Amino acid sequence: MVLHQIIAGAAPHDAITDHALRLRVWLHERDITSEIYAGHIETGYESPIRPLHSYRDQGESHLIYHHGLGSDVADTVIAIGKPLILIYHNVTPHHFFSGIDPAKAAASQRGRAQLAQLQPQTAIALGISAVNTAELQANSFTQTAVLPIALEPELYRFETSSDIVARKGDRPILLFVGRLAPNKRQEDLVKLLYAYQQIEPHAQLALVGNRWSKDYVNWINTLASQLGVQQSLWLPGRVSQADLVSYYRNANLYISMSEHEGFGKPYLEAMHHQLPILAFQEPGTTDTLGSAGVQFKEKNFAGLAELIDLILNDRPWQIRLVQQQTERLARFSPAVVKQQFAQILTQLNL
Amino acid sequence: MSDWLQFKDDTHTPEKIAAEINTRLATRQANPVPDIPAYGTMSIMPKLTDHDTQQLAHHLSQANQLYTSFTTDPNLADSAATRIPLLGPLWKRIRGEAHNLILFYVNRSMAEQNQLNTHLIGTLNELARQNVALQQQVQQLQAQIDMQKQVASQ
């Protein structure tokens, strides 16, 4: 049996790419021949992923297509015309880019339009969280299910980087991981750092993630300079998996001000590294965290700075938070997600 | 502000922690975070109703509507060349890629121009808002002067 996957773009540590690679392993375990084809493969990325133009119909009954922002790849998938197992990774709403970046706003709108176009040929549509599945249902997809992203512990077995340890010193680090984009609201974390430094002057903020929007990165830098916190701000861009692990191990708190998350894989990584989580409550975040971590509904910077101080100075509370988070993480273990995936394949007689 | 926090814990409750935060805020008296607007946001166009400001209202509303509405999609209609068997689809693909390459750079510049436009239109909106407020203030002061003149003349 053959069941190939198609993704728009492939890059190291990219959530969609990693998800497709994991599904490929599980498909191979079921003796299903499966390759991943991508419309764009990042230069220098060594992986088993093949360029989409090399895809050839092998008489397979279905294709797995991972959908996100609008792209020509979705049009290609529609043109191929095979019944789909659609995995929906969410499209960041265009209003986060309107008036700022017309190309990204257009890609967002196109992604939603393509979602509707993909509906007629979709056998089953899988959201990576309940919020995404609800959006699929709102778009008239009738056969739907949730297939979350799994966290694979073996991907995080690295030595801690001595450079990061040395730079940290004994100063507390607040950490956020995610591409630098307006919907992630890293700017609010910079403002929070300003407020928190009035309580803990040595506090630092690490914003790890792809410099996806160059203008937004410039804005962040300017803001940090205006607020006088530039020396305490780490903006390393996208880092290696080994360095990512070191950031998690050296951070004192994982904090998010993001106003839109499709899933929030870094929450799983923070849970895995036993890092207490403080996060702005929005649907994608709540889906992933459940009732774990500390969630807030208002961005009251002075109040949040006090809250951070309370958490970081209450070790027993931190331990209890981590315990709840670890229990939550069990839902995203490879064994659990693999079982869910197997049920979906069985449902489709695959 | 007691319902802005959500967590489950055996020892702490969100209400207790919120109360503790309020107490700390009252005693610490920290400098508030400067009121810097969020990325991509700008002052909203004020209501301009005075007859003297009709031209300003027109230009400002047009600028507010137009500053983001740039077309960024490739305009690729089929032509006789693209309908030639075998070579036509190849030509169509090459043409499409060429358009996409140009759009990549155009969009990058456009994003930067949009940033500037956002700040410029936001500045104009803010200046117009301040102007309206000043006009109202002047009118109030004028009314007071007129009233005092009337009182003085009686």
Image (tube, grey):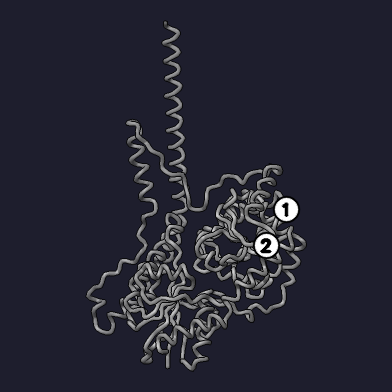
The chain under label 2 reads: B
- Residue at 38%, 92% (x, y): give it: A58
Label drawn at residue A200: 1
Indicate the position of residue A254 as horizontal and vertical percent values.
64, 63
Q: Furthest residue to the top?
A: B154
Indicate the position of residue A117 as horizontal and vertical percent values.
33, 72
Above-or-below relation of A333 to B116: below
> Which class describes the residues within 10 Å of circle 1: few (<14), some (14-19), or many (20+)?
some
Label drawn at residue B126: none
- Between disc 1 and disc 2, the foreground one is 2
Which type of secondary structure does the marked residue at label 2 adopt? loop
Apparent side of residue A59 relative to residue A196 in the rendered image (left or right): left
Which amino acid type is marked by label 1? Glu
Q: Quadrant of the N terminus of chain A?
A: bottom left
Q: Quadrant of residue B147?
A: top left
* Disc 2: which residue: B10
Above-or-below relation of B39 to A340: above
Q: What separation in Å lies between label 1 and label 2 (alpha carbons)?
A: 27 Å
Indicate the position of residue A215 as horizontal and vertical percent values.
52, 58
Apparent side of residue A19 relative to residue B15 in the rendered image (left or right): left
- Residue at 42%, 5% (x, y): give it: B154
